[in-house]
Image (tube, rainbow, N blue to C red):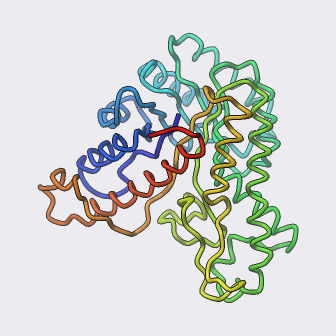
């Protein structure tokens, strides 16, 4: 099951969501939507691409399994949209390791509520707090019997964490992600940066193997990245397209760019490893790529914006949706699925 990040990102009215619905319909892509309350989700789910395409809801990043009120909010969302959404996503927490027993108890308390809901969506806990991947996997091993809670592997987050670890081992006290603010130092370190970046894919594949033995659904957030990237409007190093490279302002091995952490080939390996290890019926993938400041003419979607004078944000949205669709085609190719 394949999805894309479905939200406005840009200033404008709901014509932007109509544009997203059109492009997602054309790509036959499900939607991952952000919402904090059932009322918010009720508004945005009206724009879902099609009733036969999946919807996953990304809940607020500050939701914490240890918080009883958050557990009630999760239950309310699951109850209100049971049978209409496939899953819900919350972030993990830095204390997941140091307070593992508390989180296990909280997961079981959450399960006692979710298990009462017919056609209950799965709650996926996303790798986001920078834990060691093996410790993240260990938590899910400890709740193997909890039916409605499983893992979300954010491949970009895992990859950046591994690149930072590898580079820090090579250069104690140095943070690979800080080099982008020190461009004159990049040529000195570029070879070791490549080595660190190259360690990302094996770590992601190992984590998939570790979670595949649990026999539970696993959700993926798919995006590429590079520690030197300054592309994201949110000032993060990842959430990039798999179909680009990292430009350099100097020559390196005869080129002025280097590969990102995964690229097209890495996406193929991740998707195939997930299907082989976890099972085709238990994996879901959301392309969580952020927009860049580029534009694409609206073409067949132009009538949606007849009431707009300045079409800049509409064309920026259209460009971002085109990038999502291009990456979705590569994902389907990896899964041997026709759009």
> At 68% across and 38% down in the image, what residue appears?
274
> At 28% across and 49% down in the image, what residue appears?
19
Left or right: residue 23 versus residue 271 is left
Q: Quadrant of residue 83?
A: top left
Query: Where does residue 179 sit, x and y in percent of width and height?
Result: 69, 77
Please identify the quadrant where the C terminus is shown.
Answer: top left
> At 37% across and 43% down in the image, what residue appears?
24
Query: Where does residue 275 sit, x and y in percent of width and height?
Result: 67, 35
Left or right: residue 201 versus residue 267 is right
> At 70% across and 83% down in the image, what residue appears?
186
In this rendered view, identify the residue nearer to me: 182 or 204. 204
Query: Where does residue 290 sit, x and y in percent of width and height?
Result: 48, 57
In this rendered view, identify the residue nearer to me: 243 or 290. 243
In this rendered view, identify the residue nearer to me: 321 or 332. 332
Q: Quadrant of residue 262?
A: bottom right
Q: Quadrant of residue 292?
A: bottom left
Query: Where does residue 185 sit, x and y in percent of width and height?
Result: 72, 86
In this rendered view, identify the residue nearer to me: 310 or 331. 331
Q: How many marks?
A: 0
Left or right: residue 136 versus residue 327 is right
| In this view, 134 is above or below 160 | above
| In this view, 79 is above or below 278 | above
């Amino acid at each position: 099951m394949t999805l894309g990040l479905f939200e406005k990102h840009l200033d404008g009215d709901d014509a932007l969501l109509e544009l997203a619905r059109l492009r997602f319909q054309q790509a036959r892509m499900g939607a991952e939507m952000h919402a904090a309350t059932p009322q918010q989700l009720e508004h945005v789910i009206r724009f879902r691409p099609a009733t036969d395409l999946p919807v996953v809801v990304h809940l607020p990043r500050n939701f914490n399994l240890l918080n009883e009120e958050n557990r009630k909010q999760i239950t309310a969302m699951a109850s209100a949209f049971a049978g209409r959404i496939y899953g819900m996503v919350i972030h993990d927490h830095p204390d997941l390791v140091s307070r593992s027993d508390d989180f296990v108890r909280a997961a079981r308390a959450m399960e006692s509520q979710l298990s009462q809901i017919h056609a209950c969506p799965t709650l996926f806990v996303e790798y986001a707090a920078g834990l060691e991947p093996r410790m993240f996997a260990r938590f899910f091993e400890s709740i193997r019997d909890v039916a409605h809670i499983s893992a979300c592997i954010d491949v970009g987050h895992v990859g950046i964490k591994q690149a930072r670890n590898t580079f820090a081992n090579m250069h104690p006290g140095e943070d690979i992600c800080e080099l982008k603010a020190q461009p004159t130092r990049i040529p000195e370190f570029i070879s070791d940066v490549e080595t660190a970046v190259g360690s990302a894919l094996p770590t992601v594949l190992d984590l998939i193997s570790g979670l595949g033995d649990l026999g539970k659904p696993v959700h993926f957030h798919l995006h590429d990245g590079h520690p030197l990237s300054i592309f994201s409007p949110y000032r993060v190093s990842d959430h990039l397209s798999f179909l680009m490279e990292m430009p350099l302002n100097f020559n390196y091995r005869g080129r002025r760019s280097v590969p990102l952490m995964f690229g097209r080939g890495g996406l193929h390996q991740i998707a195939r490893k997930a299907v082989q290890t976890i099972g085709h019926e238990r994996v879901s993938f959301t392309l969580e790529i952020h927009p860049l400041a580029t534009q694409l003419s609206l073409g067949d979607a132009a009538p949606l914006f007849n009431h707009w004078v300045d079409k800049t944000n509409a064309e920026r949205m259209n460009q971002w949706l085109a990038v999502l669709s291009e990456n979705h085609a590569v994902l389907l190719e990896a899964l041997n699925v026709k759009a």
